[in-house]
Amino acid sequence: MKNAGATTGPLLPWLLMNLQPMNRTRIKQLLQHGRISVNGVTVTQHDHELQPGDKVEIGKHTTSPHLARLGIKIVHEDDAIVIIDKPFGLLTVGTDTQKVDTAIARLNEALEPRHSRAFLVHRLDRETSGLLLFAKNTDVRDTLQEMWEKVTKQYLAIVVGTPTPPEGVAESFLLEGPDLKMRKSVDPEAKLARTSYKFVKRTGRYSLMEITLETGRKHQIRVHLADMGCPVIGDEKYGSKHNPARRLGLHSWKLALPHPVTKKLIEVESALPAVLAAIV
């Protein structure tokens, strides 16, 4: 652990000065892979502003025992936003049947000692893992929701078969039925859903797909891939009969957005979980 002393300014120049002879590329790799923390919080942005007395820790994974116990990992945090890596099987927020153990509840427990709080910006399905963005106050929440179309939201999906064509845009109007499934519909209440997709690789009967959300409708990735004849593995709700990972094969792997306060570009990534990566 190193003390920044009286230093102020961006993190990267400080690292270049204090980690000689390590080069810029290696230092950026450490940042990208979550191997640097400031005051116990993982930092991935090279322009993070250091303040006098900050404690910089380098060279090991920085998830605290408290966060590990809570089962979440903070991948980016500043005064306005916090992004976590949500595990499979955890609700984003409470429902009528599950009000207590949720991602936002666990995050708020982690933030409480710092007198901070998370506010909901968007959701991930319980069965989906990966990056989940929260605001730290209601003004930032409102700003993020207003600029949501400027946020790049990319997923990795493991599907049965290979779509034809291997790259394109799926578009349909979706409506939720009494069984809580989303389906194509000509009903005036149905909402437009657009999903960009790209084939990445195939291993045996399964394919890895990169997905970019252009709208944010419930289950739209799962519906569109199933409609192409390539349901996501583990997705019994939408017709998949294959479940080699014993979980849904969908992972939120990349978020990119202009920071709601500073306007600087924030980009974070989360690697495909090992149980899914082993399949493809």
Image: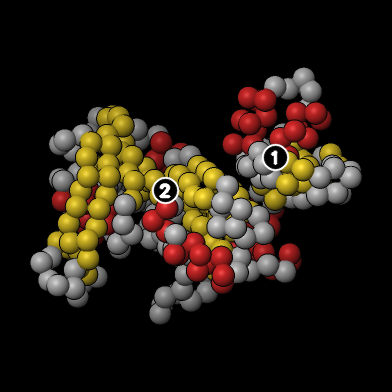
Q: Which residue is mark 1?
A: 36
Q: Position of residue 110 (x, y in %)?
A: 66, 63
Q: Amino acid at mark 1?
A: Ile
Q: Residue at x 82, y 40 (%)?
A: 1
* Residue in the image at 18% along x and 38% along y: 163
Would residue 194 be found to the left or right of residue 27 on screen? left
Q: Quadrant of the C terminus?
A: top left
Distance from the alpha carbon under mark 1 to that under mark 2: 25 Å
In this view, 72 is above or below 191: above
Image side of residue 110 versus residue 268, left or right: right
Q: Position of residue 80 (x, y in %)?
A: 62, 60
Q: Residue at x 54, y 62 (%)?
A: 134
Between residues 10 and 26, which one lies in front from this camera angle? 10
Q: Residue furthest front?
A: 263
Residue that badge 2 annotates: 152
Q: Nearer the viewer, mark 1 or mark 2?
A: 2
- The answer to which image quadrant residue 239 occupies is bottom left
Q: Which mark is residue 211?
A: none
Q: Residue furthest top?
A: 21
Q: Residues within 10 Å of mark 1 (few under 14, many from 20)?
A: many
Give the x, y percent position of residue 121: 48, 64
Between 44 and 49, the one nearer to me in the picture:
49
